[in-house]
Image: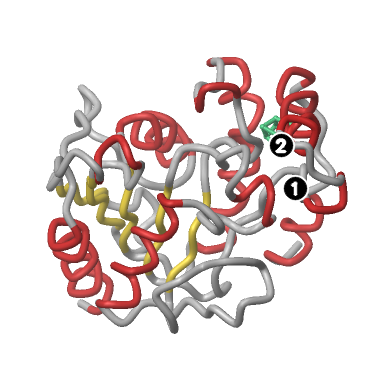
């Protein structure tokens, strides 16, 4: 299986009844036509030989659940892609739709939960249901992946067990999420280590209040570039 096979399989998943109902209710909530919404699980976005990963939380109901591409079509994505473009990891600063021409350079964006949850809060069961998709994606990226920027505590906590079950050694007690956290995880099989970098989530809750600025996000990605190129 390659990443394209995985992406194709992800979009057909209906493992979480609550999230299936929620994602498919989105057009009704906005009085839109069903065909205006993706309303399916959102696959990862970026090249198969990415050296940098970006892990968020879950699709936004009227953002990537509408457009079908990670962080595309909402304010969180506007903020993220502005930063990625500024540091040279994205071809343009705006992400509007799946066919807007945006390309990521050496970077792949994924989320621990692939369907939009009510109030952006997946249940622990839904997080666990979705874990195998993230595990498979990381396994496929493993030959090149050297750094992962984790946007927020949910992604951090969801990611650590996946890494631990793969071939990276996660310290005990597990490291706590913080903006600016940097943790190097040695590979247990003699492969390359992976560096985790913590960053506040790019949600309006953080960006509109000034808790997270463009410069703060760009600094994290600049550090990821240095680490990934080492
Ligand atoms: Fe499937 Fe994940 Fe969506 Fe649940 S959240 S239905 S496991 S893709």
Ligand 1: image quarter? top right
Quadrant in the picture for the N terminus: bottom right
Q: Residue 194: x and y, percent?
A: 30, 56
Under tag 2, what secondary structure?
Answer: loop
Q: Quadrant of residue 30?
A: top right
Distance in Å between CA atoms under marks 1 and 2: 25 Å
Mark linked to residue 30: 2
Mark linked to residue 167: none
Disc number lying in front (1 or 2)? 2
Q: Quadrant of residue 7?
A: bottom right
Asked if labels 2 and 1 touch by Cβ distance under 8 angstroms, the answer is no
Q: Residues within 10 Å of mark 1 (few under 14, many from 20)?
A: some
Quadrant in the picture for the C terminus: bottom left
Q: Residue at x 19, y 60 (%)?
A: 214
Ranked by sequence position, the earlier of labels 1 and 2 is 1
Q: Residue 77: x and y, percent?
A: 44, 56
Q: Residue at x 77, y 50 (%)?
A: 38
Q: Is residue 125 left or right of residue 52?
A: right
Mark 1, residue position: 10
Q: Residue at x 20, y 22 (%)?
A: 173
Up the image or down, 134 lies above or below 14; here it is below
Q: Residue 158: x and y, percent?
A: 43, 31
Pointer 1 residue Cβ closer than 8 Å to ligand 1: yes
**Which of the pair 4/19 is nearer the observer?**
19
Up the image or down, 207 lies above or below 4; here it is above
Q: Residue 134: x and y, percent?
A: 57, 44
């Amino acid at each position: 299986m390659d990443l394209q096979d995985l992406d194709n399989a992800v979009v057909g998943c209906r493992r979480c009844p609550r999230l299936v109902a929620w994602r498919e209710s989105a057009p009704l909530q906005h009085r839109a036509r069903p065909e205006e919404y993706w309303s399916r699980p959102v696959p990862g976005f970026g090249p198969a030989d990415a050296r940098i990963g970006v892990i968020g939380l879950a699709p936004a109901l009227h953002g990537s659940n509408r457009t079908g591409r990670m962080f595309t079509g909402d304010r969180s994505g506007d903020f993220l892609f502005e930063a990625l473009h500024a540091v040279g990891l994205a071809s343009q600063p705006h992400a509007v739709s799946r066919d807007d021409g945006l390309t990521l350079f050496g970077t792949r964006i994924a989320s621990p939960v692939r369907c939009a949850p009510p109030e952006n809060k997946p249940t622990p069961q839904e997080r666990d249901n979705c874990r195998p998709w993230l595990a498979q994606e990381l396994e496929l990226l493993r030959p090149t992946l050297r750094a992962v920027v984790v946007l927020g505590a949910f992604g951090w906590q969801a990611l650590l067990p996946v890494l631990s079950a793969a071939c990276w050694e996660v310290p005990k007690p597990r490291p706590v999420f913080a903006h600016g956290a940097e943790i190097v995880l040695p590979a247990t099989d003699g492969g390359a280590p992976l560096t985790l970098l913590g960053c506040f989530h790019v949600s309006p809750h953080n960006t509109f209040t000034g808790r997270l600025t463009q410069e703060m996000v760009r600094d994290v990605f600049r550090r990821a570039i240095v680490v990934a190129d080492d």
